[in-house]
Each structure stands twice: as structure tokens, then as C-alpha cells.
Image: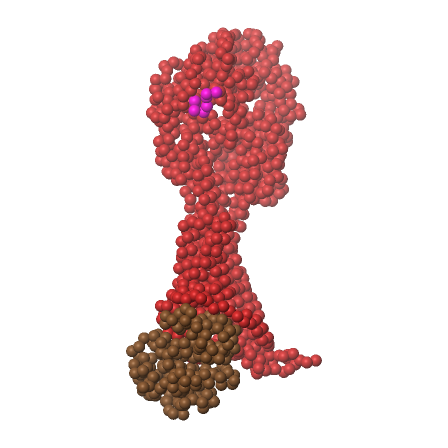
Amino acid sequence: MAILEVKNVNYTYHTRYHTVEALKEVSGTFIRGKLYALVGKSGSGKSTLLSLMAGLMLPESGEVLFEGTPTSRMDLDKYRLYHAAVIYQSFRLFPLLTVSENITYPMELRGFRGEKARALAAELVEKVNLPAGALDRFPDMLSGGEQQRVGIARAMSMNSGLLLADEPTGNLDTENGDRLVSILLDLAHNDDYCVIVATHDLELAARADKVLRISDGMLGDG
Amino acid sequence: MKPKTGDRISGQDPPAGKNGILAEKIGIKSILRTPKKALLFLILLATLVTLLTLVMCVHHAVSGYLDECNRYYHTIVELEYMGQEYPDSHAADSSMQASLAENADALQALLELPGVMQFDAEDALLGVIPDQRRKDYQVFDKDAAVIVVYITWWDKSTDSYSALIKNAPYAWGDVLDKITYVSLEEGTLQPGAYYVMCGHFITSANNFLLFQPEDEIVGTGEDALSVPGRQLLSGETLPGDSPYYSLAQVYKNRNNGYRVSPVTDMETLRPWQQGELKLIGGRLFTAEEYAADAQVCVISNILSTVRDLSVGDSIQISLNDCGDLIYSSWFQELAPAKEYRITGIYYRTKEYPDTLFIPRSEPNASVKMTTGYVLGQFRLNNDLAGAFEDTAERLLPAGYKLTVYDEGYGAVAGPYKELKNLSMLFLLICLLVVPGVLALYSYLFISRRREDALLQRALGAGNAHVLRGFLAASLAVTLPAAAIGLTAGRLLEGRVLDYVRVLAERFGAADIRFSSANLFTVRQLEFAPVTDGRVYLLAAVVFLVFVLLFTAAFSVDAMRERKPRRKKKPRAVHGRTSRLSGRLKFAFLSIRRGGMRTLAVVLLCAVITVFLGLLTSASDQYAAQLAEIRDNTVIRGYATDNLGRYRNGMVVPARYARDLIDAGLTDAVYLTWEVSNLRFIGVTRTADGTMRELEDLFVPQGGFAVETLQYKLSREPKWIATNSVAGAPAFYYESEPEITWLEGYGEACLTGADADLCVLPVSMMEEKGIELGDTVRFLCWLEDDDEDKAVGESDDKDRFELLDFLVAGSYVLPYGEETIYTPLGLTLPAGSEPAPLPERAYRPQRYWQGAFDHSWTYRSLHLFTFRSMIFTLSSTAELDLLRDALEGVPFEQVGVNSGVRNYAVIDDADFVSATQGMQRQIRYMNALFGCLYVAVMLIGAVGAYLLQNSRKPEIALMRALGVGPARILVTFLWEQMLLSVLGVAAGGFVWKASGGGANGLFLLLIAVYEFCWMTGSILRILRALKPKAQELLTEPE
């Protein structure tokens, strides 16, 4: 069964001087165990589609279904908290929280706290190939690649099965980018995550299980 | 040499000519194409210019008005001697001479006090107009005479000689061939013999002349003679070389002479300054006439009428410098008469001696004795009058008095001085705000164009080109803003200045009816400022100079190549993961790890707490000081004459005193009643109980002997019945009167019924050998007037009476004449019990019943008149009620002409000045502090808002992670509340440790501040709670 389904989704941006149809009748199905790459030119609608899938906004028409339930009928806060984990291009970590605290923050929001949460955070840090000593460090003590891996660890801590990433390698060098893609693939293939990545990175797209191209707000196979 | 970037050598500037104004064109276009922002700047700057202009206009107008006041008003301080006849301007008090000599140093010290611009000693010359014989009632000594008499017989019944006046070398009236009685103090005359005598006629009730020769007359001056009071003649003809002719000439000169007063500035002379003397024709002297000691004069309407003189006429006057007391010098030959042209004629009042004024270039600085009690006047710097008065009061010897006449300068200028300070404060604020706002404007203006500058530079434009463009763009906004602002300022100026006038009236609007602060206000200068273009020009220049400076400075900065920012020092490699959990975890961690952000909030809140503490405690201190002044000030008032002088010899109906007491606003009302004069006869019983026999005293029963004795008694010490010696006029200016009481007696005994007590001056006791506790006998003349009869006091006729008094107290005479005080026998207020006195073993044979019997006199107060009245207000809070009560009695205010001729003054000038000043300061403070409180609250709200601004990414991330808005709000509010409370607590601790206190206002303001802080935080968090998806998913700026 598809974990995420997009059905005839339309989204238009209205500005004072003009109107932009960002998405036009976009449909697609996303299943667990695969890494999807959303590619397209700047302004093609990648980030808009990712925002709809992440529950940051609702489509104008059409539906985004999570495990068969439209997001429009769900509490979007809870949807984001329990089901949709997002990795951002600029990492988006709490600067005043340590790595461990950043990772356990979503867990605590869901009532999973204390030593157990910290132990799980340590496990996740190990899984994303960060040294154990990184747990007590603040984000600005880490390199960009390390910060992005903390972001993945935080996403994994949500154990949502759906991981969305917006240009995750955009701020990383090649080596760190490769390492990140490997982690994402590992998550999709070994941990049965559905990973959807919006990217300009052709190398990342080449390693994806499926490439979807967005052009002028229309979604098609790459 | 390598050319610098932008140097003209490089050829990067566009050539002058067709592209010469390209920079300006681009600059102006950039403004025209961003009309909304330009309009915003325009409004902001125009408002700024309007404010600056108005504040400058107000300051200029108020300062100008105060300068005008300084020229218009003249503050003078009159120095007077409080002699026994004070304030009689015709009196010649010989005690003044000795006092002046004794206190010369102290009086000289007054001249050297700061603020003294000039001292004009009272000076007068004897001016004699040839052939002028004065017949008016102000003739100095019209009873003086030199006569030749024929003694007819000794009249035993009158104790005097009957005589026929055969010759009168000098007498004011026509006495030739008239019968007169001659009364001698000592010696005898031969009936049937001729005598020449010098002395005084005594006005008799039955139209007979009574003449009393002097013992001897000794004149003053170098050519003065000593003339015996009487001399036996061989016939009725006086020898031609007799000194009595000289004496007659002296009498003639001084009785026909006028007082001539040389003045350096007539307008500032007290009677003129206070409007007691008014010009009814012509003019006063010109500056040239003063400078040249011109032979011009201003005369009285009386002299003008008598001599049929008009303005422009000339008059011959012989001016004689008496050197000392006018009328005392022995001029046998007068100075030659000179011609004086009359420039003005004034209306002379009864109180002022008929005086001719002449101009003088230099003031007379040395104090000398003249008639009356005015010694001279100081001209003071208006603003230093208060300081002079304070210092001078300390230096002033007893028996002297200073009175400040400022024409109303203090009352008029006071509020405007405060307004000037206030406008200066606003001007300073403006001069700080204007550069601040213009710097901000210039920064924003240029920073928006920084990219343009770099692009222009990249395209080869020179620095000057870019700068010109920026200046043109800036001036395209600022010049219209300046024009609009100045126009708005001009339109609003009138209204604002009207408001300033209203404000000043409100500041000076205290009730000063009957106030001593209102005594000498005689002139009012209207606040009528006119527009001064220079102020507008100055405002425009200040504004534009700052604009050009800041625009140029920021333009240069914008064109400067920037050095790369220094990299942040990396933080430590290790942190520490918190074990905290739960809803407050994020807030606590954020506070703990916030670093400068946390510190900034705590510091800001702490500083603001201390600041609020300072402001509120300043308000408290002022309020406490005001309360202290109100609580600790004793306000007195008194019945007075129409010039506001405190004096004895008033006529205060007793009913007025009763009504004032009944108003219930006074703590004490001290009254004096002048009974008669007392001649000391002797001690009848000493303090140890020894009785003494006194010789029988001859008391005449009728005729001239009675009148002679009456005349002599009138020169004896006054007998004053009072309910307080310390409250008597003689002690009014004494802060601590030296009064000693016999054991068991005190001031309270003066209100009781035990009336045969007296309080004597120490000088008299020493002279007569009297001790406290002695019983002394006096002789007095008691008149049986109708009023006394009506209350059943006595049916006796007018009579001489021997009275015995117990000497219960003594006092040191502060100044003036010796006075014997006895109880008034009046218990005030009605119904209160008189103070108990010790039992007395001895009562004198003649028992004086007291001026009043307290058992009935309170009800019968309407039957009497008092000679003085002082009252003390119970509470300063009831000052206005007292004014109402005085009006209701009715008393009249000094200077107001109405049917009421009883005047009263409340001596509250210092109190009114202090409280008004304090209240004004509190008002300014409240206004200023009100603004500061609002500013502090705004700082709190805006500060919190801005600090939360930096939390926007965290809030967005939380939202992205699915945290609900309520939880985010609570998390951040907890953090802000904890931080601000911590800051307030720290500030409170510092404030407390430095000795500050917390009042209700302080706590309220802290609560409001907390509220504002939280409100600012809430507003920002609420705004941040709805991030756009794009903001999260794209790289932040």
C-alpha cells in the first residue's frame, strides 16, 4: 500500500502583480522502501510539492493522502509530529540544544523522554556515522555534513516511515553529499522508509530508485 | 604614481557638461520612483522640523519675554529703621542716629552682597524758596516759636504763669499781643518782667495758648549756636545781635523749606515704583538731565497750586545740605537760590512729605539720617533678589527692616522661568533627537542605495559623482521636508505660544489673595511674543547641516571597500547535555545557554527597574518635601495699613478679631490695645515683701497743669494691654524674643483675669532699679470714653490714676520705644479657661481691673478697637479658607481700593513661593516622568519584540516539527517571563541595596512593564507562529 499518494493536486501562488500556477493536476504514488528524487528547474514546483507532502500547507484542490487519509482531514501539527519527517537544506537545528537534545526533542514531544530517549539518540547518532562524542556538542561545533546527519538522526527519531528532504546536499561538499545519500538509501532499503528528495543534484538523482521530474508544475517520470 | 581609485586622473568621472548633472538626476529619479518610501521619510522629517522649530520658537519667545521683564521690572529693597514713630515719614527720630553709628559695619556689609547693583541712601536737602511762607499742615514744626513775653502773674490753680506776647521773632501763627500761659519744668519767672523764650506752643482744648520753653537749644552744624530756653530782658525790645534772631531764622527756614530729594533714577524710587506718587503733568527726568545734574525739578501739586506753577515754569530754590538730619541744621545764611525748571508735577499723598525732586548723576552711598525711617534703597538684579534677601536677613541688625519691592517680577517671571527651563530641556532633547533621527534616516537612506553605489563605482563613476547623487537624492526629500516643517511650525507657532501663556497662567494661578507675595505687584507685562524669522532660519540651518553631514558621512562609508568580517572565534568543542525534561525544558535551556541574549534581557530589565525606582523615588521625595514644608511652616498674618506694613497704631475693630477667631482657622490671635502712657513713680513693694513708702504725688485737678501733665505723660512709655508680649508688633521681626518671666508666670497669664501684672523692658528696670517680683506704681491719664461707660466699667470722669502692678516679666527691647505690657484680660478663644496663676500673698491697694474682663468681653468685642492684630494659621492646608475668612470679615487686600479700609496681609510669600515652585517642579516632573514611563514601557514592549525576532527560525522549526502554537507560545513566554522577572528582581535588589524604597507606583510600574514586555513577546511570537512553507524549505537570508 502506498504510504503517500498525491491526487490531482493544484496549487497557485497569488502575488500582487501576478499569479503563478506552481502545481497543475499533480498526481503520484509513493511507497515504503524506495528513495524518490524530485528533480526540475528552479521554480518548477519541487518545494511546493514537498511542502504539501510535509503537511506544511494544504493543496488548493486535489488531495495528499497519507496511508489513505487525506492530510486535509488530519491535524497538520500531529501529521508533522508523527508521520512526516523533514530534512532541510540548511539543517534547521536548534542552536542552543546539543546534538542529543536536538534529536530527543521530537521524541519528547511525543512523550518519549528520559534515559530511554537519550539511549535511542545515541543509537541514531551511531547509525548516521557520527562519533559518540558528538552527542554533547552544539550544532555550531559541527561541520555542515555532521549537522545534516544530525538532521537525519532527528528525522529518524520520529520513526515515521516517511522522510522528506529538501535539497539535503545543497550545502554539503561532494564527500559529505555522497555519505548522506548512502544514509538515505540505507534508510529506504533497509529500514523500509519512503524517502522523497527534492534536488538539483543529478548524482543523487541517479542513485534514486525513482526519479520524478517536475516541469511547469506538471509531474512526470524522469 | 599610481592613481587612486576614483581619482579624476583615472578619467572615471563623467566630464562636466552634458553629463554634469547626471548624478543629481539619478539621485532625484531614485526618490521620485519610490514615492511611498520618499513620502514616509518626508512626513517623518517634516514632523521633526516642525517640532524643532516650535521648541526653538517657544524657547526664544520665553527667553525674550524674560529679558523684557528684566528691563521692564525693577527690584528694589528698602532699608528702614524701626523707630518708635515708625512708619511716620515726617518723624525725626534721634535714636536713629546712634543706631546708625552702632550698626555702620553691618549696614556696609549689605552693600557688598551679590545682586546689589546700586544703593541710593535716602538723602534730602532743605530747599527754601525765597518769599515762600508755608501754611499747609505738613509744616515740620509749626509749634516752634521764639517769643518775647511780659509775665503778668503766677496762677496757682494751673501751675503756670500768665503772660502777654509782646514780640514774636518767629511763630507760625499770629500770636502777637495774645495771652499765653507759660509752664516751666524747673525754676521760676518774675511777674512784671520781660523774657525772651524759645520753645513750643501746646495746643489747648480751650483755645488758650500754653507755651513750654525748652531748657536749651543746641543747633548742629559748624555755625550753630547754643541758645538758653529763656532769658530775662530789660525791656520788651530784643537786642539786634541776639542769638534768638538767629534761632528764629532757623525756625523760619525749616518751617518754610521743602524737602528736596536728589534722585538718580526717579522711576525706581519706591514711592514712584509702587505708584504711591503719580505724575499728573509733564514728565520725569531724562537720562541727559540725570547725567548733567541739570537744574530741573518735579514738584508736588500743592506747591504748584500755592505758587501757581506749571510745567515749563522756573522756580528759584536755595538748596542747603544739612549734612545730617534735615531741619536740624543751623543755617543763618542760606545758599544762594538757583533757577530750576519744572519738568513734572506729581500728586502728593498725605503719607509722603511735600518733596521736590531734582536729578543727580551719582547716588549718595552713605546712610544718613533724614525725616522718616527710610534709610535708602538697594537696586537689585531681579533674579538675585531672593538670594540677597536670604543673606541680608541674617546680616541685618535688630531694629532694621528690609522690604523687597519687585513690582511683581517674581510673580510674573516665576512661571516663565520654569517654562524656560522646560523649553531648554525640550530643546536639548530635540538637539539629541534630531541628529539621532537624521543619522538613522541617512543610514537607512544610504544603506538602501549601497548596491547602487557599488554598481556605479563598478561602472567607473567617481566617488564625487556617487556622493553628489546621494546628496541630491537626500536633499530631494529633506528640502521639501524642511519647507513643510517650517511652514507647519509657522502656522502652529501662535497656538503653541498661546498654550504657553495659558500654561504660565496656570502655573502662577495660586490663590494669593491677602498674600504678602502679592503686596507689591504693581505692573503687568503681557507675554506677547512676535515671530522672529531668525529662529526659523536657525532651525532650517541646524536641520540641513545635520542632513548634509550624515548623508556625506554614510555615503563615504557606503563607498568604502569593506574588509572581510573577522571569523567568529569557535566555541568550545564540548557542551553538556541537560538532564532536564518536560515542558519548561526548552525555556530553561534557552535561558541557560542564551549567553549575551539572556544577559541583555536581564540587564535591560534590571536597569529599567532601577530607573523606575529612581523616577518614583524622585516623585516621592518631592512629595515628601512638599508635605514637610506644609507641615512645618507656620504662617502668620496681620492687620495692616494700606501699604502693607506691620505696625502698631492700627484701628482694628474687635468684632473683626472675633469673627476671625470664630472662623476656627487660627491657632492664635494676638492683640494689643493701647491704653495710655505710664509714668514710673516708684517701687511700692520689693520682691522679698518689703513695703516702701512713696512720697505723696501732686496731681493737678484742672486747668493748664492738667494739660501740661498730660503733655508730659504723652512722652512716657506706652501702656499696651496684650494677650502676648511675643506677639506684639515690636517682636514681629524677632525670631526669638528675649522675655524672662517670674516663676509661675508666663505668656498665658496675659489672657487671664489677674490683670495687675506687667512686663517691663530690661532697660527701664535697670534704670529704675526694678527687679522681677517687685510691685511698681505708675501714674497714668485715663480717659472715660463712651465705649467704656457703655459696658459699665466706670462712671468716673477722665482722670489721673495711680496704678500698682506686679512685675511678672521683663523683655529685651528689640528696637523702638519702651513699652509696658499688661494683660489684655481676654481669654481666646471664647469659652477656654484662663491659665491658673500662683496665689499672690499681696494685692496692691489700687487694683487695676484689666483692660477687659474675660467673663464678658468676648461677647462684647464689638465695643472695642485694637491697635494691632497678629494671627497664626492652624494648618497650611487651610490657607485658602483663611483667605475666604478674611474676605468675609471683611478685610481688604492691600492695594485694592474699596469701601473697606481695614487691610490684612498673610505673611505667606515664602511659603507660596516654595510650595508653588515645588508644585511646578512636581508638575513638570509628572509630565516628564509620564513621558519617560511611556518610553520605558515602549522600550520594554519593543525590546521584547525585537529580541523575540531573533527566535523566528526556532519557532519556525518547532512549527515544522509539529509543535502546536499554544505550546510554542507557552515555551517562549516562560522563557521571557523568567528572564524579565530575574532582571526585575536583580534590579530591585540593586535598588534596595542602594537604599531605594518601593512605593505603590513603583510596584505598579514594574507590573505594567512586565505586562508590556510579555505583550511585546506575545505579539512577535504570534506573528512568527505562521511561517510560510517557503521560508522553511529555502535557504534563509
Q: Judge left or right: residue B852 versus residue B736.
A: left
**Residue B80: image location, x then y, percent:** 54, 32
Q: Judge left or right: residue B749 versus residue A75.
A: right
Picture layout, residue A156 above or below residue B705: below
Q: Judge left or right: residue B268 versus residue B651.
A: right
**Residue B270: image location, x then y, percent:** 52, 38
Tell which residue pokes out farthest to the right in this image: B1
The quadrant of the image that shows the N terminus of chain B is bottom right
Q: Report the residue at 48% width, 20% height from top.
A: B743
Determine the image quadrant of residue B949.
bottom left
In the figure, what tint was chain A given? brown
- Observer-nearest of B69 and B193: B69
Question: Can residue B318 be seen here?
Answer: no
Picture layout, residue B409 above or below residue B550: above
Q: Report the residue at 47% width, 71% height from top.
A: A98
Determine the image quadrant of residue B144.
top right
- Observer-nearest of B667 and B784: B667
How many numbered discs, if any? 0
Picture layout, residue B875 above or below residue B985: above
Question: Can residue B227 be seen here?
Answer: yes
Q: Report the residue at 39% width, 20% height from top.
A: B753
Whether the magenta-drawn stretch holds residue B744 is answered as yes
Q: Report the residue at 41% width, 71% height from top.
A: A116
Whether the magenta-drawn stretch holds residue A63 is answered as no
**Residue B929: image location, x then y, percent:** 45, 54
In the figure, what tint was chain B given? red
**Residue B141: image location, x then y, percent:** 54, 24
> What residue range appears in magenta?
B743-750
Tell which residue pokes out farthest to the bottom in this image: A222
